[in-house]
Amino acid sequence: NNSTATGKSQCLKRDSSRLLLTHDSFIADTPDKDDENKRSLQNPFRDGLGGPNRSSILLTVSFYVAVLAVLEQMTRRIILQFVHVDPILAVERNRHILSRHIAVDFISCLTVGYLGFTNRHVCRDLIRQGSSFGRSNTMKEDEFENRIFNYHPASQRLLMMFFAYQTKNMFDTIYWNDGPEFVIHHIFAGAAAWGGMFPGCCHFYALFYMGVSEISTAILCLLANFDDQYGVAGLDQVFPKTKLVLGALFVISFIICRVIMWPYVTYHFGRDTLKAIRSDAARAEGRRGYLWVIFYCCAGLSVIQVVFLAQIIITGKEELAKMMD
């Protein structure tokens, strides 16, 4: 009958490996009550919260890593056409550094930032609560389970894209010998993204942490080209106004995303996560360990935001002093 055929079709769709290139690729079938009870007994590290299987995720991750590698090579060839602008672009290493920061880092961060922003409707309760300065009471404490354990196709897609970026970034970090601190960062960032898919949780908050907040990182990736250690030494002498504009944009975006929005979102994330860990919810089984890890990671990142803010203030004063001189 039709219901049996539909069930077989959904099972085949779930078990087969395929490229996930659109939002619709991540839409999971809505289970009936009996299927929901069965799903609560599944292995979260194998099945997640629903949606595409692990083999499809890994296949698509490999595809996007390859796309980033191709974009990087194309950008190198494009920059090569502008070596006449300044001798600094005639140095092959400099062109490779610029290509990495533009084609891989900037495009990846801008992509996840775009996905997070365009799917902000998923977080409408959080937005309403903040825009009303707490008067709307849309972030009810007893609804934590929906925010921590509900599956959202847009979030699954974003987490997969973020994981693909961290995979390519890990390779680049080792190749360019950026340092162990960057390797550790990519391991934790990649693990957080993968954990959001398998065992799966916090889709509601992923749109901010691995989406919207990365908008400021995208600008920072362009600004990194002007760093003497990790960028192109002397580039600020060639394009001083570009560095100034990017610096101003980064400060503004950092204050909005990391100083204003981050503490607000983190307060609700921390509250919901602790309630989920201490609850007897069926979907908390098999996920409490990951929730503890992501909770402490978020706490550590919040401390880092304060350190970054202090560095921005110090650097800003130094740049102003240079301009005055």
Image (cartoon, rainbow, N blue to C red):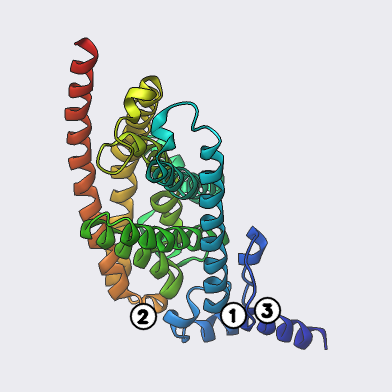
* Mark 2 vs mark 1, CA separation in Å: 19 Å
Residue holding disc 1: 33
How many circles with numbers are drawn on the protein? 3
- The type of residue carrying mark 3 is Lys
Tell which tag, 2 or 1, sits nearer the viewer. 2
Q: Residue at x 44, y 63 (%)?
A: 163
Look at the numbered disc 2 and give the secondary structure of its residue. loop
Q: Callout 1 environment at 10 Å: few (<14), some (14 to 19), or many (20+)?
A: few
Q: Position of residue 82 (x, y in %)?
A: 52, 32
* Mark 1 vs mark 3, CA separation in Å: 21 Å
Quadrant position of the C terminus in the picture: top left
Residue holding disc 2: 285
First reached walking from the N terminus: tag 1 or tag 3 = 3
Q: Is 269 in front, or is 116?
A: 116
Residue holding disc 3: 13
Q: Callout 2 environment at 10 Å: few (<14), some (14 to 19), or many (20+)?
A: some
Q: Residue at x 33, y 37 (%)?
A: 232
Q: Position of residue 99 (x, y in %)?
A: 46, 45
Q: Residue at x 26, y 68 (%)?
A: 292
- The type of residue carrying mark 2 is Glu
